[in-house]
């Protein structure tokens, strides 16, 4: 189902209804289930869909211990796989039936695309995710992550 209906990484479907997106529903489900380390590694290395991987990174940002966050995300900082972040309400999904965004077949698809690596870097650099607050990282850990990011860029 993720492969056919998951086509953007917003937490709510754009528009007046404020309906939770597939990404948000999966995130809540994962937070309820509490993934093991092995399950998380399988999710982050998933080859079929970058969306599955990105929900895994979002889960880590919400649920992992701040001290271990860098260890999880470091190998993916420069991942070049492209992922769609936003989608216009009513635009068609991958299966042509509109996915979660209504049945607007044939309408133009306005979205932001970025690499998985850039998505990961933004998750750990900021405290906001599309209008929602992410858990704050302790100041010392936030500084360490910023230093490590600068070192990784070199």
Image (cartoon, rainbow, N blue to C red):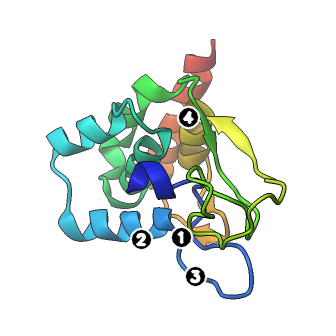
Q: Residue 68's x, y, as percent?
A: 30, 41
Are circles 3 and 1 on residues that touch, CB within 8 Å? yes
Tell me if mark 1 has few (under 14), some (14-19) or many (20+) residues whose alpha carbon lies within 10 angstroms of its own: many
Can residue 39 be seen from the camera position used here? yes
Label whose residue precedes the other's in the sequence (4 or 3): 3
Q: Secondary structure at mark 4?
A: helix
Q: Quadrant of residue 107?
A: bottom right
- Residue at 53 percent across and 24 percent down: it is 79
Looking at the rendered image, the quarter that the C terminus falls into is: top right
Q: From the viewer's perspective, is residue 123 above or below residue 130? A: above
Q: Earlier in the sequence, mark 4 or mark 2?
A: 2
* Residue 146 versus residue 141 in the image, above or below: above
Quick one: label 4 or label 1, which is nearer the N terminus? 1
Instruction: Give the mark count.
Output: 4
Camera-side residue of 132 and 112 = 112
Camera-side residue of 144 and 98: 98
Element under disc 2 = helix
Circles 4 and 1 in contact, beta carbons < 8 Å: no
Residue at position x 38%, y 29% from top? 47
Question: Does the CB distance between marks 1 and 2 fall below 8 Å?
Answer: yes
- Where is residue 109 drawn, in percent x and y? 79, 53
- Look at mark 2 in the image and give the residue it sits on: 25
Provide the residue designation for mark 4: 116
Q: Nearer the viewer, mark 4 or mark 1?
A: 1
For label 3, the residue is 19
Quarter location, residue 59:
bottom left
Which mark, residue 21? 1
Q: State the CA–CA distance, disc 3 to disc 1.
A: 6 Å
Q: CA distance from mark 4 to mark 2?
A: 20 Å
Disc 1 element: loop
Horizontal side of residue 19 vs 59, given as left or right: right
């Amino acid at each position: 189902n993720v492969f056919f209906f998951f086509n953007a990484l917003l937490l709510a479907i754009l528009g007046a209804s404020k309906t939770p997106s597939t990404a948000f529903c999966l995130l809540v489900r994962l937070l309820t289930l509490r993934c093991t380390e092995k399950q998380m590694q399988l999710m982050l290395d998933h080859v079929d869909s970058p969306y599955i991987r990105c929900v895994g990174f979002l889960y880590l940002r919400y649920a992992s211990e701040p001290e271990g966050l860098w260890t999880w995300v470091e190998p993916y900082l420069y991942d070049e796989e492209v992922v769609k972040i936003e989608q216009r309400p009513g635009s068609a999904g991958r299966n042509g039936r509109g996915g979660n965004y209504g049945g607007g077949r044939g309408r133009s698809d306005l979205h932001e695309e970025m690499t998985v690596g850039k998505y990961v870097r933004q998750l750990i650099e900021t405290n906001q995710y599309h209008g929602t607050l992410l858990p704050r990282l302790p100041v010392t850990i936030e500084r360490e992550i910023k230093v490590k990011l600068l070192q990784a860029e070199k």
